[in-house]
Image (cartoon, rainbow, N blue to C red):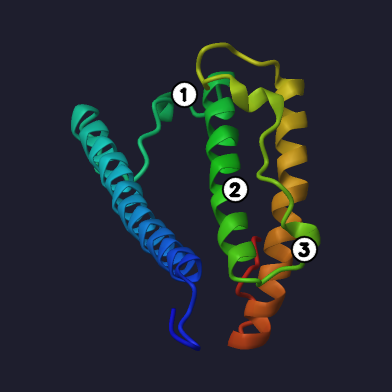
Amino acid sequence: MKQGAPKSWIWVAFISGMLAVSAQAEDLFDLHISVGRVGVMVGQGETALRILTDSSEELVNPYADEYDSPKALHYSIYQNALAFNALQADACALNLVGEDLCEKPYRPRWMNKVPGKDEPSPSKLASWNEDLQARVSALTGALCEKAITKSGDEYLCAIE
């Protein structure tokens, strides 16, 4: 072995490490393609749902004709919770709100039931909505405070 030449085990370790990094990058690229494919499939499903229900709305509401029924309210609260989780994920990933607002996604036990399969009592619906409203209020309050400061529009987040 020549003086100063690296030992073969060092080269093997170096090459193995490079191959692992390359394989990991390839795996991540393949995963990126797969994740994108799932997003496309969800979009196709949404389009198919709109076609099947003759709806031009972005979100099909199966209870649009019975807006104040327990099933319709359950569905709306469920959809609001899903939208909150997406908003929270975006706001937290962009570091726009404090860590205290970046807990795990909102997933109470009642969300394990598909909306419309039963009719929760009005008191249960009110309780679910109040719990969700408290979380949404805290998150949107933090976001709106920053957005109002940036935009100068004091009515940006006014509800009434």
Q: Which structural element holds mark 2? A: helix
The answer to whether residue 26 is above or below residue 146 is above
At 33% from the left and 58% from the top, the residue drawn is 26
Front residue of 10/38: it is 10
The local crowd at label 1, few if under 14, some if 14 to 19, many if 20 or more residues have their Cα within 10 Å, is few
Q: Amino acid at mark 2?
A: Asn
At x 64%, y 61%, the residue is: 159
> What residue does disc 1 label?
66
Is 95 in front, or is 81? 95
**Picture coordinates of residue 60, whole percent (x, y):** 35, 35
Q: Which residue is mark 2?
A: 85
Q: Which residue is mark 3?
A: 99
What residue is drawn where x is 72% and y is 46%?
A: 133
Q: Position of residue 67 (x, y in %)?
A: 50, 29
Spot occupied by residue 82 in the image (x, y as percentages of width and height): 55, 42
- Quadrant position of residue 113: top right
Mark toward the start of the polypeptide (1 vs 3): 1
Give the class, few, some or many, for how many residues have Cα within 10 Å of label 3's Cα (few <14, many ≥20). Answer: few
Give the Cα distance between marks 3 and 2.
Answer: 15 Å
Do tag 3 and tag 2 residues touch (Cβ < 8 Å)? no
